[in-house]
Amino acid sequence: IRLMWFSEVTNSAIVLFVLVFSLWGGVLSSGVCSCQSDLKSLIAYSSIGHMALGLSVLLSFYSVGKMACVCVLYSHGICSPILFSLAANSYE
């Protein structure tokens, strides 16, 4: 995250390519997530959707986007293990 803001890759075709595929992956994983019956798979696919959202917001190259990406990644790191723990407890 820190190195992206110092380099001049904001108008690169590679950034646009990664941005489009990140958004498309987020949409596909959200669609798969809506069809899941297994709780652990549901949490995993929603995790992929959140990471795709964080990457696409980061690649927007706005300062608010950078802060939003950090907030999404931080909250995901806290909530995801707790959700997996609750899912494991519910299976028992």
Image (cartoon, grey):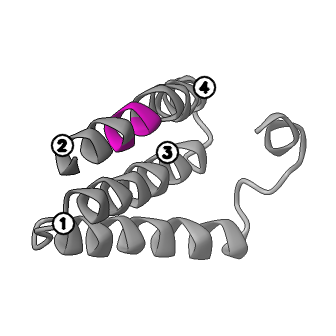
Return the disc, 3 or 1, that comes first in the chain's sequence: 1
**Start-end of magenta stretch:** 80-84
The reply to whether the C-beta atoms of the residues labelled 4 and 1 are less than 8 Å apart is no
Residue matched to label 1: 38
Return the disc, 3 or 2, that comes first in the chain's sequence: 3
Q: Between tags 2 and 1, which lies in front?
A: 2
Give the main secondary structure of the magenta stretch: helix
Q: Is residue 27 magenta?
A: no
The reply to whether the C-beta atoms of the residues labelled 3 and 1 are less than 8 Å apart is no
Give amino acid for label 3. Answer: Gly
Residue matched to label 3: 54
At a point 26% along the width and 45% down the height, the residue shown is: 87
Residue matched to label 4: 63
- Give how far apart the Cα atoms at labels 3 and 1 are: 25 Å
Give amino acid for label 4. Answer: Ser
At a point 40% along the width and 30% down the height, the residue shown is: 79
Residue matched to label 2: 90
